[in-house]
Image (cartoon, coloured by chain):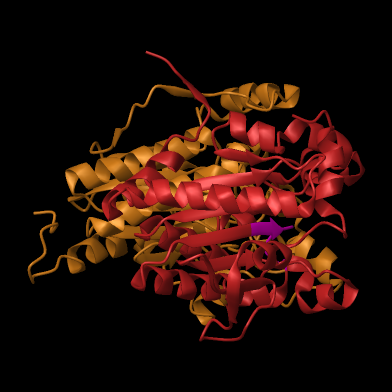
């Protein structure tokens, strides 16, 4: 495991040159077809959804997408979803269940967009409903944290049977800046916050939130993608052996067991 | 996550402040109409201003006294205690201070009680304790309560009052959103009623999980309810927010809650809704 500090990982995870969801989708899957729209209000480009296959195995893909340049970032709202993102995701996740397709989600967002419209259209409700629907789905779900996983906006599409996380990705309750601002009223202490927050892949593995860490250091993008592909297939094969009810129950138990407290008599 | 924003909000209009219950002394000023009120008169009026109807924040114990039939509330004893997963020095200190000050163990009280003789599992969050934020213990208590309701085939009523997920427990707090949501979905599969009551304030990870998942969602008048806190939105978009933004009235208008209920009507409304939700056709969980 690498010896980078948490803050170094924050910087890597946020880097403008870091590979985005679409890069991984194109490298790992074949015949990707993007499907748009929440059928209620609009299409939110901060989340990319669609169908694709690996070999003869079909998948539904739900992915948070940051722009790969400034222009694209403006279009994609810097990967910060509005409620329509989650409603599009819910629509396609239900469709995946109808057609018995496993679901792969890619997590890479600073969080749900903090805007007036987002609140008017129920950002909280949309995130809640996405988690709620995921908890009921009778198909395998694998989530992969590839960059920044921050706050409820990230969690909304990562209620999964298995969670993988790239070695230099981060997953946290809030950005280190926001955290420092709330806890110490000083967002300039973000670096210090990052070291305390336990937001690295190793931290999340130790908390039993993340099941698998994907190695990155000294590996090329193609090698990392190949490893992810291998692990997707391996895990899907295992999960498909479970019955539908067992799948739902396995997901339930995964979250049921997350919590840190002490018991006394 | 929204805690400090809520504390720092100025009360421009009839918006609640962070003053909880009734301040010391015999007289108090209403945050709504700014009139000087006799403290006892407000207390007897369910912590609502008798002049303008402004609802002051209410502690979980007072809420239970007001909603649950006298002598029927049995609190669940889980025997679990908060720990400090990120080893933050200030967390232990603040927990200790808050416990002494509020005489509460944590930010939610859960149990079984009767509301006008209707039995239900009832969970009440308390904004006096860490702004009602949800960490491991709150998440565990809520999940346990919902599971208990499933095994006893009882309806669930949750009163939310929370700034969101508890920052001091980091990612573990975030995961409690998924944990409680999973439990709500099991409750739904079991065909049982869940009424979510939103009170001032309901924000962040609580809004974005169980609070917005009720079969029926009620709110108190003028309560502040949202996902992102107002200061963060203002800083992001660089403009001030419209009047009435994120109030219960705003949510009702946008279709996100079923009904706004005045505090004095809340108990009767809840028992009535429990009765009205008993199906006559083929249901098994009719709580008879």
Q: Quadrant of residue A78?
A: bottom right
Give the residues drawn in magenta, as a range: A107-114
Q: Nearer the viewer, residue A153 or B113?
A: A153
Residue A208 appears in the picture as rendered: yes
Colour of chain A in the rendered structure image: red
User: Where's residue B168, x and y in %?
Assistant: 67, 34
Residue farthest right in this picture: A188
User: Where's residue B210, x and y in %?
Assistant: 45, 55
Check the picture and name the quadrant holding the C terminus of chain A: top left
Q: Nearer the viewer, residue A256 or B32?
A: A256
Is the magenta region chiefly helix, strand or loop? loop
- Whether the magenta-drawn stretch holds residue A111 is answered as yes
Q: Image check: A189 left or right of B72? A: right
Q: Quadrant of residue B197?
A: bottom left
Q: Nearer the viewer, residue A191 or B56?
A: A191
Q: Nearer the viewer, residue A134 or B251?
A: A134
Q: Image check: A134 left or right of A53? A: left
Residue occupying the point 73% across, 46% down: A169
Q: Is residue A29 above or below residue B254?
A: above
Q: Is residue A169 above or below residue B12?
A: above
Residue occupying the point 66% across, 52% down: A226
Residue A153 appears in the picture as rendered: no
Residue occupying the point 33% across, 46% down: A249
User: Where's residue B94, x and y in %?
Assistant: 68, 27
User: Where's residue A112, x and y in %?
Assistant: 67, 63
Q: Image check: B226 left or right of B72? A: right
Check the picture and name the quadrant holding the N terminus of chain A: top right
- Whether the magenta-drawn stretch holds residue A112 is answered as yes
Colour of chain B in the rendered structure image: orange
């Amino acid at each position: 495991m690498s010896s980078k500090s948490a803050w170094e990982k924050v910087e890597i995870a946020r880097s403008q040159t870091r590979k985005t969801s679409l890069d991984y989708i194109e490298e790992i899957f074949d015949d990707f077809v993007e499907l748009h729209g929440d059928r209620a209000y609009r299409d939110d480009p901060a989340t990319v959804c669609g169908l694709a296959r690996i070999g003869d195995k079909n998948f539904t893909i739900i992915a948070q997408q940051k722009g790969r340049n400034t222009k694209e970032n403006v279009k994609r709202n810097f990967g910060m979803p509005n409620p329509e993102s989650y409603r599009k995701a819910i629509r396609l996740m239900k469709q995946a269940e109808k057609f018995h397709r496993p679901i792969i989600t890619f997590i890479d967002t600073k969080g749900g967009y903090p805007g007036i419209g987002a609140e008017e259209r129920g950002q909280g409700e949309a995130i809640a409903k996405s988690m709620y629907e995921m908890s009921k789905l009778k198909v395998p779900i694998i989530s992969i944290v590839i960059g920044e996983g921050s706050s409820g906006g990230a969690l909304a599409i990562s209620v999964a049977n298995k969670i993988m996380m790239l070695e230099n990705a981060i997953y946290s309750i809030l950005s280190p800046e926001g955290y420092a601002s709330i806890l110490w009223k000083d967002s300039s202490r973000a670096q210090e916050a990052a070291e305390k927050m336990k937001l690295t892949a190793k931290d999340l593995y130790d908390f039993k939130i993340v099941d698998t860490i994907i190695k990155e250091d000294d590996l090329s993008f193609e090698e990392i993608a190949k490893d992810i592909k291998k692990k997707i297939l391996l895990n899907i094969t295992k999960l498909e052996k479970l019955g539908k009810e067992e799948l739902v129950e396995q997901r339930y138990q995964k979250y049921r067991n997350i919590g840190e407290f002490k018991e006394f008599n | 996550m929204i805690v400090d924003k809520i504390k720092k909000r100025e009360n421009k209009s009839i918006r609640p402040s962070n003053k909880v219950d009734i301040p010391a002394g015999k007289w108090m000023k209403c945050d709504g109409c700014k009139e000087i009120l006799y403290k006892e008169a407000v207390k007897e009026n369910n912590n609502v201003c008798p002049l303008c109807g402004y609802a002051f924040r209410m502690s979980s114990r007072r809420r239970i006294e007001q909603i649950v039939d006298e002598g029927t509330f049995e609190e669940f004893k889980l025997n679990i205690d908060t720990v400090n997963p990120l080893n933050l020095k200030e967390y232990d200190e603040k927990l200790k201070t808050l416990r002494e000050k509020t005489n509460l163990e944590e930010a939610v009280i859960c149990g079984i009680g009767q509301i006008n003789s209707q039995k239900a599992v009832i969970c009440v969050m308390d904004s006096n304790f860490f702004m009602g934020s949800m960490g491991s213990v709150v998440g565990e208590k809520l999940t346990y309560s919902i599971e208990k309701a499933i095994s006893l085939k009882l309806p669930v009523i949750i009163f939310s009052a929370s700034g969101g997920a508890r920052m001091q427990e980091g990612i573990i707090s975030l995961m409690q959103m998924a944990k409680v949501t999973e439990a709500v979905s099991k409750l739904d599969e079991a065909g049982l009623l869940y009424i979510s009551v939103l009170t001032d304030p309901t924000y962040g990870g609580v809004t974005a999980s169980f609070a917005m998942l009720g079969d029926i969602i009620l709110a108190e008048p003028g309560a502040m309810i949202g996902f992102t806190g107002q200061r963060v939105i203002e800083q992001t978009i660089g403009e001030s927010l419209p009047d009435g933004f994120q109030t219960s009235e705003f949510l009702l208008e946008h279709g996100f809650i079923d009904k706004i209920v005045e505090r004095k009507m809340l108990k009767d409304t809840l028992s009535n809704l429990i009765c009205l939700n008993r199906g006559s056709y083929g249901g098994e969980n009719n709580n008879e």
